[in-house]
Image: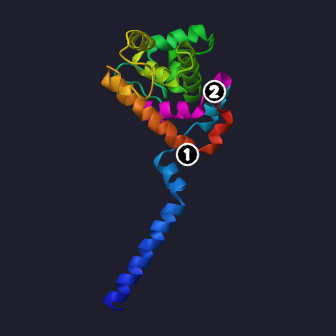
Amino acid sequence: MSWLLRKRVLLLLLIALVLFLFLKSDWIGRKMYPVKYTEDIKASAGNYKMDPYLIAAIIRVETNYTTGKVSSKGALGIMQLMPETADWIIEKADFTKVSRETLAERADVNIEAGVWYLRSLHEKFDGNSVAAVAAYNAGPGNVNKWISSGVWDGSLESVRNLPFGETRHYVQRVIYYYNKYKQLYPELKGASL
């Protein structure tokens, strides 16, 4: 086979590969941005009338769907609930058969509690999902302080004004994954608002 013919065959193979990847981009996207525990996410989203894409994005940023995680600060489970917050959720939501250990070990229970908490933050910030996400990371007291003092207006457009770099980055990452998941997983939509 001549050098020119080999070059053309390689070029055709490259074009075919690029076309295949372009046509199967959702397949590649799903491999790069997987969602696990979809049934638990949909069930909890439905229970608390929350957006399942937002829940999936928070889980991705918190633990990348790895169960049994305990952070260096002590946050528990797949949605990384702080121990004091977990105790508060258990009491306020009346989760009678739930303990910190259960929250740390069982993804379905952790998702349920995390979504309950996210819903409470969503209500606290009058339906402002961006402020609720910031509060999920930095705590509602900090977000209240930032909004009431005018440091941040609670919008995604002004997220650069968040005084905690970690929270600023957290909100940006959650919104990034939220948009990716909306594009790649239309089947989650059935449980959204």
Q: How crowded is mark 1: few (under 14 residues within 10 Å), some or many (20 or more)?
A: few
Residue 137: give x, y in percent of width and height. Answer: 42, 21
Q: Does the magenta stretch include residue 113?
A: no
157 sits to left or right of 94 = left
Cα distance, mark 1 to mark 2? 21 Å
Q: Viewer-proximal residue, 173 or 105?
A: 173
* Residue projecting furthest to the bottom: 1
**Residue 67 seen in render:** no
11 sits to left or right of 48 = left
Secondary structure state at the residue bearing disc 1: helix
Q: Which mark is residue 44?
A: 2
Position above or below: 89 against 37:
above
Residue 190: give x, y in percent of width and height. Answer: 68, 37
Q: Name the residue under label 1.
A: 183
**Which callout, 1 or 2, points at the residue further toward the start of the chain?**
2
Position above or below: 55 against 163:
below
179 sits to left or right of 153 = right
* Residue type of the residue flagged with mark 2: Ser
Q: Does the magenta stretch include residue 58?
A: yes
Residue at figure coordinates x 44%, y 78% from the top left? 12
Q: Viewer-proximal residue, 26 or 103?
A: 26
Residue 85: give x, y in percent of width and height. Answer: 48, 13
Q: Which image quarter: residue 161?
A: top left
Q: Viewer-proximal residue, 162 or 76?
A: 162
> Between tags 1 and 2, which lies in front?
1
Which secondary structure class fits the magenta region best?
A: helix
Query: Which residues make up the magenta segment?
Result: 47-65
Residue at figure coordinates x 51%, y 10% from the top left? 87
The quarter of the rendered structure image containing the N terminus is: bottom left
